[in-house]
Amino acid sequence: MALGTMTLKLICTSRFNHLAPAMFILWNNLIQIPISFTVGAPVGIESPNQTSDYFSIYPNPSNGIFNVILKDVVGDVEYSIFNGLGALIKSGRCKKSFQIDLSSSSPGLYILSIPGLATKPIIVR
């Protein structure tokens, strides 16, 4: 998408306006709403409601061996690792610091999820 100002025309049709009362849609009618917005240069990728303060992973990317250090965690917690298609690759329980071995996995992007804490990408080279 190019930088600059763009104008779009949003065309809404719905027979389900009772499910979304906050939306401006009329029953069995067609509404056209012009919308203008400005596209600027991206400044980063935001992960809503998640912070990197919950745990750290190093090295990342790696050849498959990752060290994970959990912060402010008492006791065991569960973790899951998913591939790019969302399939579960590995799961287990861990303590404050642990190691993940994905050295036999194909190179690519994986997701480390610790429920209740955060989700972070890990990259196998």
Image (spheres, rainbow, N blue to C red):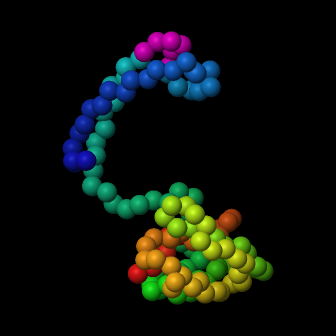
Task: Give the magenta part as a residue range.
Answer: 25-30
Q: Residue furthest top?
A: 28
Residue 112 lies left or right of residue 78; in this view the side is left
Identify the residue shown where x is 64% and y is 70%: 80
Q: Position of residue 27 (x, y in %)?
A: 54, 13
Q: Quadrant of residue 108?
A: bottom left
Residue 18 lies left or right of residue 73; in this view the side is left
Q: Is residue 62 visible?
A: yes
Taking depth in this image into account, of 123 and 51 the one nearest to the observer is: 123
Q: Is residue 66 visible?
A: no
Q: Position of residue 40 (x, y in %)?
A: 27, 50
Q: Position of residue 29 (x, y in %)?
A: 46, 12
Considering the whole magenta stretch, tell me its main secondary structure. Answer: loop
Taking depth in this image into account, of 87 and 114 the one nearest to the observer is: 87
Residue 32 lies left or right of residue 67; in this view the side is left
Identify the residue shown where x is 70% and y is 77%: 92
Identify the residue shown where x is 64% and y is 80%: 70
- Give the answer, above or below, for where 41 lies relative to 28: below
Q: Quadrant of residue 96?
A: bottom right
Identify the residue shown where x is 43% and y is 77%: 107
Look at the image and tell me in which quarter the C terminus lies.
bottom left
- Give the answer, above or below, for where 27 lies relative to 75: above
- Give the answer, above or below, for where 80 lies relative to 86: below
Would residue 98 be counted in the magenta stretch? no
